[in-house]
Each structure stands twice: as structure tokens, then as C-alpha cells.
Amino acid sequence: MSIELNTKDGLVTITNDVIATIAGGTAVECYGIVGMASKSQIRDGIAEILRKENYSRGIIVRQEDDELHIDMYIIVSYGTKISEVASNVQSQVKYTLNKSLGLNIDSINIYIQGVRVAKD
């Protein structure tokens, strides 16, 4: 699926992969985030941390009527307050998608797939 925006200069089409990549890049820059996790089931109790080119595997972009919903699967670092990290990711992703693509996001749902201890 994709989003089509009519501008004065013509039609702009934004695919869901572009939205997911921008959202994933914004999320991993937030404090307390170790990385993005795959939206598929966790195997053997270990969540896979996705690389930059695979962020769209950890994010689901849904369009219902004129509303845009994003589901994000993340891994947080140990010792951080999970509710604060999730809230920060929600606000940062919403702000970035609004400023960079001009999209109004209706909801951003955060799913914590794991907690990792930072290696020093």
C-alpha cells in the first residue's frame, strides 16, 4: 500500500516501506532503544535486532479509511523506564513523520520485544 498526496505540482506517492524506514531510523536514535525487533514471533526467546536496511520488518504501517496507524516492535536497554522510552519514541516518530513527509499519524503502538543489557 502507499499514500498519495495531491500537491499543486502533481501527485506524490509514498510507500509504506518509506514510512517504516523513517520511523525506524527515528526510533533507534531515541534514548533507551537498543534496536528494532522483527515483528515475527520470537524464536528461542531471543529477539533479533534488525539492521538499518531491514527496519520495515519491525514496523507495520496500516491505513484504515483516512487514518494512519503504525505498530513498532522495539528492544529497550536494561535499566530504563520502559513507559518513558515508549512515550518518547511515539512523540519523536510522530513529530518526524509530520515534519519530513507532512503526514498526520493517528496512532503509534509500541510493542517491547525484549530488554538487553548494554555491553561495555
Image: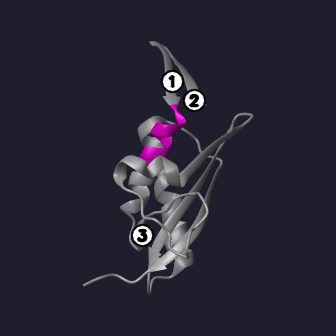
Tell me the amino acid under the disc marked 1: Thr
Mark closest to the chain's N terminus, 3 or 1:
1
| Res. 100 image quadrant | top left
At 50% from the left edge and 73% from the top edge, which residue is drawn? 46
Whether residue 70 is situated above or below residue 33 in the rendered picture: above
The Cα–Cα distance between marks 3 and 2, rounded to whole angstroms, is: 28 Å
Q: Are marks 1 and 2 in contact (CB under 8 Å)?
A: yes
- Residue at which label 2 appears: 2
Front residue (pair 8, 34) = 34
At 43% from the left edge and 45% from the top edge, which residue is drawn? 21
Mark closest to the chain's N terminus, 3 or 2:
2
Element at badge 3? strand
- Residue at which label 3 appears: 33
Residue positioned most to the top = 9
Find out whether residue 18 is within the magenta segment.
Answer: yes
Whether residue 55 is situated above or below residue 98 in the rendered picture: below
Q: Where's residue 14, x and y in %?
A: 50, 29
Whether residue 10 is situated above or below residue 63 in the rendered picture: above
- Residue at which label 1 appears: 13
Q: Residues within 10 Å of mark 3 (few under 14, many from 20)?
A: many
Give the residues in magenta.
Answer: 15-22
Q: For this view, does 37 lie left or right of residue 104?
A: left
At 48% from the left edge and 70% from the top edge, which residue is drawn? 75
